[in-house]
Image (spheres, rainbow, N blue to C red):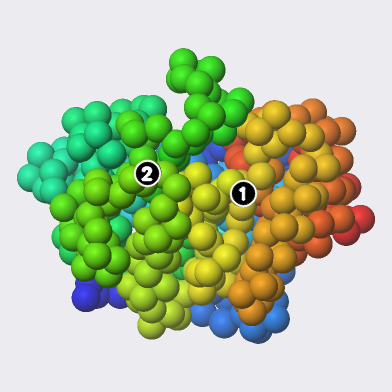
């Protein structure tokens, strides 16, 4: 196991500009009471509101502190900074390509102002050239027999690794071990913990010039040798020999369980051993990505209720929030659910309505995608709407 790092060091050059927080340069504000990063939070003190943040570099540590104070003043309790993309780490990794030690810069000021910090990690896709070139067997294969390395679905970065391949499993486990060994980090946040979309959201189909009304072979995964042999061992048939793989309940459940077993049996135990909370960004149309997240042993779940992707309105956010909670409770899980909202698609009044509907659906809080899409008017609307909850 990699040695546990201590990242709570003196502030150096920062990494977060106005584009990343959505704030114009704010006036100086009195600092809020700080939180000692070494003090464990009470078990019932879960965050209420969160925000996803993509890396932004070359801003001073002093500016970081001011921006994080503004987040706290606008009812944000936790941040989800992206610490690993599909190609590089944004922390001082011992084995991954490192783009920047961004986490080391933002973690101290975030903790000082009382924000929880949960490292956001892209999970299954990988475009690291060394991995792609040397371990093609790790990657998923579609029903046409095409590797995601050679013919990825939709976009080039959709090079997903297979949840049943031992090498791919070890690769993701090592990332989880390294990230959850970071001192001061409160948790790890899994993204892209799924298969590629077998049917993509309706509003996105024109973007890719496709029409999907049913499962189609180029987007249906995984038919690699390992998945096929495991399924045949358990069910007595090769998926290719099924009369119609798209209607086979056993084959569908096999894909669901492939992701669930990776999460519950291999990844979450690592985070728990290192004392970290576990959360995930998930799909409302979970069947389309074989992501049965209501079976996962998560502390927090953040379904991405991006209504504009589904030609839906605010009531849909309420209904999907409620449905997600019902699925969790149906499995006997007390996981807290936070409605993920796409703020880039709304005006301030629309954001307030989405928040209102999420709370009508009994969400534990709100998660904003993303900080870079926020502006002063949206932050004001967010603070007002969340203060009413």
What is the quadrant of residue 344 in the picture?
top right
- Say if 105 sits above or below 296 in the image: above
Front residue of 171/136: it is 136
Q: What residue is drawn where x is 24% and y is 48%?
A: 241
**Residue 72, visible in the rendered structure:** no
Which residue does the image show at 53% across and 62% down from the upper left?
Answer: 293
Q: Is residue 7 left or right of residue 171?
A: right
The image shows residue 218, relative to residue 220, as above or below, that is: above
The residue indicated by pointer 2 is 244
Residue 267 quadrant = bottom left
Where is residue 161? Give x, y as percent: 27, 49
| Residue 34, above or below 280 | below
Q: Is residue 235 above or below residue 308?
A: below
Q: Nearer the viewer, residue 196 or 245?
A: 245
The answer, for residue 195, to whether it is visible in the render is: yes
- Does residue 357 appear to the left or right of 1 in the view shown? right
Depth check, mark 2 against mark 1: the one in front is 2
167 vs 176, nearest the viewer: 167
Mark sitting earlier along the chain (2/1)? 2
Residue at mark 1: 284
| Residue at screen point 68% across, 73% down | 329
Q: Horizontal placement of 149 versus 47: left or right?
A: left
Secondary structure, mark 1, is loop
In the picture, measured across the screen, residue 19 lies left or right of residue 105, that is right
């Amino acid at each position: 196991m990699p040695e546990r790092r201590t990242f709570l060091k003196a502030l150096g050059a920062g990494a977060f500009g106005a584009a990343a927080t959505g704030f114009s340069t704010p006036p100086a504000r009195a600092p809020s009471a700080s939180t000692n990063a070494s003090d464990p939070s009470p078990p019932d003190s879960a965050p209420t509101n969160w925000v996803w943040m993509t890396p932004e570099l070359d801003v001073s540590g002093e500016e970081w502190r001011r921006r994080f104070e503004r987040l706290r003043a606008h009812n944000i309790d936790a941040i989800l900074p992206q610490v690993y993309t599909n190609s590089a780490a944004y922390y001082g990794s011992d084995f991954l390509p490192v783009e920047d030690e961004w986490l080391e810069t933002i973690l101290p000021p975030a903790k000082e102002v009382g924000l929880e910090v949960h490292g956001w990690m892209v999970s299954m896709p990988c475009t690291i050239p060394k991995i792609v070139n040397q371990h093609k067997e790790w990657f998923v294969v579609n029903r046409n027999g095409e590797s995601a390395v050679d013919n990825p679905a939709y976009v080039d970065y959709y090079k997903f690794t297979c949840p049943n391949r031992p090498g791919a499993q070890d690769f993701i486990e090592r990332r989880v071990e390294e990230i959850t060994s970071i001192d001061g980090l409160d948790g790890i946040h899994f993204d892209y913990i799924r298969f590629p979309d077998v049917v993509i959201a309706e509003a996105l189909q024109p973007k890719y010039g496709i029409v999907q009304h049913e499962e189609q072979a180029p987007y249906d995964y995984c038919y690699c040798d390992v998945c096929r042999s495991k399924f045949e061992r358990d069910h007595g048939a090769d998926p290719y020999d099924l009369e119609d793989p798209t209607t086979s309940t056993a084959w569908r459940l096999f894909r669901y369980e492939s992701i669930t077993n990776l999460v519950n049996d291999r990844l979450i135990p690592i985070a728990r051993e290192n004392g970290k909370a576990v959360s995930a960004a998930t799909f409302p149309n979970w069947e389309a990505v074989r992501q049965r997240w209501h079976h996962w042993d998560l502390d927090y779940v953040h379904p991405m209720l991006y209504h504009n992707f589904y030609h839906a309105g605010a009531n849909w956010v309420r209904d999907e929030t409620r449905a997600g909670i019902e699925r969790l409770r149906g499995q006997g899980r007390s996981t807290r659910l936070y409605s993920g909202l796409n703020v880039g698609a709304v005006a301030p009044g629309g954001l307030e309505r989405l928040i209102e509907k999420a709370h009508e659906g009994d969400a534990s809080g709100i998660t904003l995608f993303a900080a870079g899409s926020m502006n002063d008017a949206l932050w004001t609307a967010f603070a007002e709407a969340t203060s009413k909850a």
